[in-house]
Amino acid sequence: MIKAVSAVILLSVFAFASAPAFGPYSWIDDNGGRIDVGYYGAPCIVDWNADGLKDLVLGQFSLGNIRFYANSGSNDSPNFTTYSYIQSDGVNIALPYG
Ligand SMILES: [Ca+2]
């Protein structure tokens, strides 16, 4: 039994052992201007509104708010025009900062 568990763990390690590959960085723009949240920006690419397009969810240091940029382009060529703050019960979610 111990050998079987060890084999499963070892196979799991090999299945996820490949290193991530990163390309060169690029700036993300909205309405032709560079998105800038100051410092300590925390971006996440996720289909937040479940429309099949990957959106940008971006934590910002200032006020600890979280921006949501809906993707109006495609997954291969995303387009972000404006943002709204993610809210809960009509209130902007704010995480501790500073
Ligand atoms: Ca989406």
Image (spheres, rainbow, N blue to C red):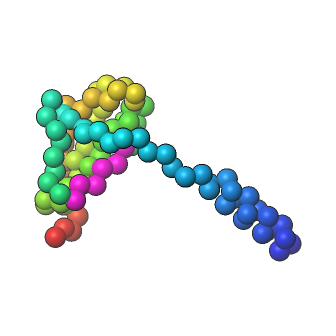
> Which quadrant of the figure contains the C terminus?
bottom left
Q: Quadrant of ligand 1?
A: top left
Q: Is residue 91 visible?
A: no
Q: Quadrant of residue 46?
A: top left
Farthest-out residue, bottom: 2
28 or 58: nearer the eye? 28
Residue plotted at (35% across, 26% down): 77
97 or 85: nearer the eye? 97
What is the x, y in percent for residue 61?
A: 18, 60
What is the x, y in percent for residue 38?
A: 14, 54
Q: Is residue 27 magenta?
A: no
What is the x, y in percent for residue 18?
A: 60, 51
Residue range highlighted in magenta? 40-45
53 or 50: nearer the eye? 53
Q: Is residue 43 magenta?
A: yes
> Which quadrant of the figure contains the N terminus?
bottom right
- Position of 70 with respect to 19 (left or right) is left
| Above or below, comparing residue 97 to residue 87 in the picture | below
Residue plotted at (41% across, 41% down): 23
Q: Is residue 40 visible?
A: yes
Q: Quadrant of residue 5?
A: bottom right
Residue plotted at (67% across, 53% down): 15
Residue plotted at (51% across, 49% down): 20
Q: Quadrant of residue 30?
A: top left
- Position of 43 with respect to 98 (left or right) is right
